[in-house]
Image (tube, rainbow, N blue to C red):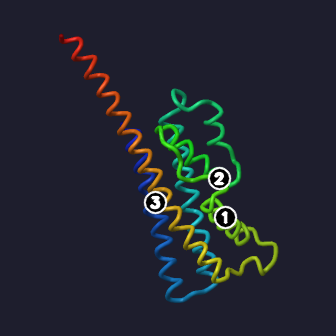
Amino acid sequence: MRDQNIIWKEYDCLSRELLRDISILEEELRNTDTQTSRRCFCRSVIAYIEGVSTWMSQYTIHLNYPHILGEEEKKELERRSGAIRRLYNAFDLYTDTSGAITPFEQDSNEWNIMQAAIKIRNRVTHPTCGADLWLSDDDVKLLRTTSSLFQELLAEVFKRSGSALVKKAKDVSRVWTKHHNQQVT
């Protein structure tokens, strides 16, 4: 249980600090919208998504390997694949090991939004020309949408996983109670 508390404290820290960055930069964009603040906002949104999805992967491995999570699934979570693939794998295996289905589907509208935001971040982080550094109003709008969408998906992941685990706990309790009652009679 102690390890689990440490893991959740890591989540709390990541989430708190990275969401604070996003909030401060949102405020800066409202007050003094500059290309610098737009680029910082872009990087912060994707850092939040990647930080939380990396945490989810580590959590899933720590709690579920090797008894639920297989070697191939573990390797998939540890693999340095593209950002969108890592995000999908983190959501999918986090929910799957709880007995739930991920709300984040490949090739869905949400997938396309996340992928577009990651492309913007890649363009800004690894520019090949000066124009790559320029973020349009549409780019900023997409990044805001991405930030909200990720938070909605994350909440749904936690909700689905939590519900599945509560159902499992009730099933175990019901079986144990039935077994215990048979022992007594």
Q: Nearer the viewer, residue 159 or 24?
A: 159
C-alpha span from label 2 to label 1: 15 Å
Q: Nearer the viewer, residue 185 or 81?
A: 185
**Residue tagged by mark 2?**
106
**Residue tagged by mark 1?**
118
Query: Residue at 67% of width from left, 82% of height from top?
Result: 136
Q: Amino acid at mark 3?
A: Ser
Q: Give the number of the mark in front: 2 or 3.
A: 2
Q: Secondary structure at mark 1?
A: helix
State which quadrant residue 2 falls in. top left
Q: Secondary structure at mark 2?
A: loop
Question: Which residue is most to the right?
Answer: 128
Q: Nearer the viewer, residue 68 or 122?
A: 68
Q: Nearer the viewer, residue 177 or 125?
A: 177
Say which label, 2 or 3, has the lower sequence index: 3
C-alpha span from label 2 to label 3: 24 Å
Vertical comparison of 159 with 18: above or below: above
Task: Say the numbered circle drawn on residue 15.
Answer: 3
Q: Is residue 153 left or right of residue 173?
A: right
Say which label, 1 or 3, has the lower sequence index: 3
Q: Is residue 10 left or right of residue 170?
A: right
Q: Amino acid at mark 1?
A: Ile
Query: Residue at 53% of width from left, 67% of height from top?
Result: 147
Tally of marks: 3
Counting from the top left corner in percent of width and height, residue 175 is at 32, 23
Question: Which residue is most to the left?
Answer: 185
